[in-house]
Image (tube, rainbow, N blue to C red):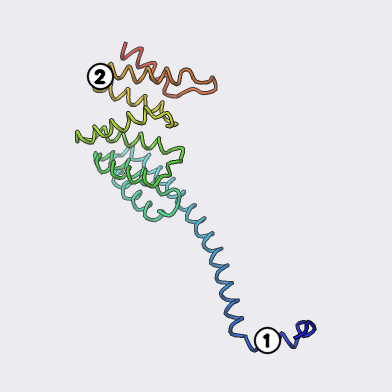
Amino acid sequence: MNFSMLLSTDFWLNFYEQHRTYIIGCCCAIALAVGGGIYLRMSRAQQHELAQAALAEMLQEASRAQQNTELWSEVEVAARTGHYQYKSTSFAPYFLSLQADALAQQGKIDEAVVVMSSMLDELPKKSPLYHVYAIKKARMMLDSAQESMRAQGLELLAGLAQNTANAQQDEALYYLGMHYMSQGNKSEAKNSFQKLMDTFGAKQSDYRSPWLSMAQIALQQELA
């Protein structure tokens, strides 16, 4: 076969007739693959938008529940359902956090802790909010009726307060001090608040810990 034959219209018509089924099949497969990829991207984007809207609506419902505590059970169910519906999106962990809040507001502390553990398992450890929610879990554990869980919560919170890699170390120190103060342990409370002041009071002028002033007030008024 020479080059001139390849340029011939008759050649390509004959080739098509001989391999029509194969050619059509390949074209259909390519079209389906490309179309499927576009649909998948559109579907993911749509799911992301729907999850964001659903979470925003649930947060509004949680705000209403602050005024009407009977609504917390509805928030719990809605958040659990939202997590199931949008578990493939990056918003999934935040539905669990809201569910944990609703459980805690109903006095179901131990259940809330379990949900918060699942939330932290799903939330990437590199997330800037990871330690915020770890502190939240520790504080929930401290409210448990079980002594063993309270002990674990204190251990978790103390670890977060000592962790210099924790971007919310100042918050952890503050709540650790508040916990000790609520237990009447003034010595440990002072140590926590003082460490917060020593560590974050010496930071650069463009950084001001929001927990610093509250620790100072506690030291001056409550622990003087």
* 101 or 8, nearer to the observer: 8
Calculate the distance from the C-alpha at mark 2 to the C-alpha at mark 1.
90 Å
Q: Position of residue 12 (x, y in %)?
A: 71, 84
Q: Which residue is mark 2?
A: 185
* 59 or 89, nearer to the observer: 89
The residue positioned 27% from the left and 35% from the top of the image is 141
Q: Which mark is residue 101?
A: none
For mark 2, give the secondary structure.
loop
Report crowding for label 1: few under 14, some 14 to 19, many 20 or more residues within 10 A (C-alpha). few
Q: Position of residue 173 (x, y in %)?
A: 37, 25
Q: Quarter of the image containing the C terminus? A: top left
Q: Position of residue 55 (x, y in %)?
A: 42, 47
Q: Quarter of the image containing the N terminus? A: bottom right
With respect to residue 209, does 58 lie above or below?
Answer: below
Extreme residue in the top direction: 224
Camera-nearest label, 2 or 1: 1
With respect to residue 109, does 190 lie above or below?
Answer: above
Q: Quadrant of residue 104?
A: top left
The three-letter code of the residue at mark 2 reads: Asn
Q: Which residue is mark 1?
A: 15
The residue positioned 28% from the left and 41% from the top of the image is 113
The three-letter code of the residue at mark 1 reads: Phe
State which tag comes first along the sequence, 2 or 1: 1
For mark 1, give the secondary structure.
helix
Is 12 positioned to the left or the right of 128 in the image?
A: right
